[in-house]
Structures are given as C-alpha cells and as structure tokens.
Image (tube, grey):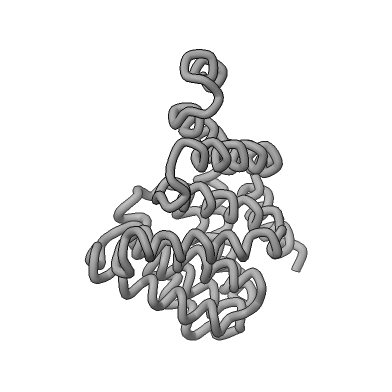
Amino acid sequence: AIEIWKTAYGKLHPAVADGQDNLALLYQTQGKYSDAEALFIQALETRKHCLDINHPRVATNINNLAHCYKSQGKLSEAEPLYIEALTLFKRLLGNRHPTVAEGLNNLGMFYIAKKDYSSAENLLIEALEIQRQILGEEHPNIATSINNIAYMYDLQNRFEEAEPLYIKALNMRKKLLGKTHPKVAISLNNLATLYRLTNRYEDAKSLYKEAIEIIEPQLDNNHPLKIRIKENLAKLEQK
C-alpha cells in the first residue's frame, strides 16, 4: 500500500507518512524494532516535509520514534525525543489534554528505565491526575497509569504500595478490555513477579500460567512479551 501511495501521490505526502507510521506500529507490536525504527524515521521526515514542524502529528511521530528507541535500550537517543514531543504537545494542545498525559506517562516510564525514580514518580502522578480529570475513573488509560505507578514502586521494592495498585489495574483491564486482552496478561505477569519476589510462589505460578494462556494464541513465539513471561515462569519452576 505504501508503494501505491508513493506512486499516486509522490514520496512526500501525508498518506505515505500515515502508511509508514501504521506499518512501523505493527512491526513494533510484533517486536520487530529495527524495521519499526527505519519506518518511524521515514514517517517523521515525510511528516515534517508535509506539515509545519509545530503540528501534533509531528509530535506524535517524534514520540513514536522515542518509544521505539527506548524499546531497544537506546536511552540516549530516546530521552531528547520524549522531551521534545511532550513540549510540543503542551504548546499545541494545552497542559490538560489526554495526549499531554500520555506524553507525561511515556517520559515517566523512560525515567524508570534510567532508574531515575524521583523524576518518574512526579511525571506518572501528574499524568494520572490529568487523566482522572478528563476521563474519569473507568478508562483503560487510567488502568495503564495505575499499573505504571505500581511498576515504579515494585522496582524500588516498595511492594506494599505496588501490590494494591497492580490488583486495581488488573481488575480494571479485565472489566474494560476483556479477560483475554494482552494488557491483562501484562498485568498478570507484573503481579506474578511481585508475588515471586515476596516468596508467594504458588500464587505467582498460577498468574504466570494464566498470562501464558492469554498470549499463547495471540502472539508469535518470538514476541518479547511471550518470551519474558515464559522465562519468568521457568525461573520460578527452578526454585
């Protein structure tokens, strides 16, 4: 489809950028980060040519590329892009906007990857407050933000703070997304890992198995999420 659009509209056209971006997002979902990165870069260059650089779609492309870099561990490349995207979102959309909350969440998760937990906590809590004001309590994005805060506490061994948030996010995702959604598997894996770290091995094993049952028919065997959950279960079974 991208080649058809290039032929019809020329290489530097918004429809071409849309196609590049969508295919990159698909590759990223499949864990094909190198292929995704190349397409995100192409989409960003196409979008900058077609639109004013101060445009929300350009900011979204910058954010997507940052996320792709982070997924590959390229933190030095990701950080300035996350900050640039968030700055653009705030300037173009205002401080109290769902996309700004998403940008705050993304930057917060980046700082978790850098182990800068103080910066991460401030950003994640700000994101959750904005989302609650705009979306209310019953929304998948709220569940994601709660899960992210729990994950941050978990990494700092603040298990008593993390556990109720993990459980809340899991229950919300089951209710709002359905019990077989991949994000439910992510929540199950997170809670199972907390149980493993706090020596509740049988509870952890049960949740890991439930997560695998969800993702087994949905994800390729080489998908990073499937590999991670199966490795977590294998570690537990070695104990």
The foreground one among 160 and 56 is: 56
Task: Spot the residue most to the right.
Answer: 238
Residue at left offset 62%, top offset 42%: 41
Instruction: Left or right? Give the position of 41 relative to 122.
Output: right
Percent position of residue 158, x then y: 55, 85
Percent position of residue 117, x then y: 58, 81
Q: Considering only vertical position in the picture, is 63 above or below 166? A: above
**Residue 154: quarter of image:** bottom right
Residue 33 visible from this viewpoint: yes
Residue 170 visible from this viewpoint: no
Q: Quadrant of the C terminus?
A: bottom right
The foreground one among 37 and 124 is: 37
**Residue 112: quarter of image:** bottom right
Residue at left offset 54%, top offset 32%: 20
Percent position of residue 48, x then y: 51, 42
Percent position of residue 132, x then y: 27, 70
Q: Considering only vertical position in the picture, is 140 above or below 83? A: above
The foreground one among 231 and 210 is: 231
Instruction: Left or right? Give the position of 117 relative to 52.
Output: right
Q: Considering only vertical position in the picture, is 81 above or below 133? A: above
Residue at left offset 40%, top offset 49%: 55
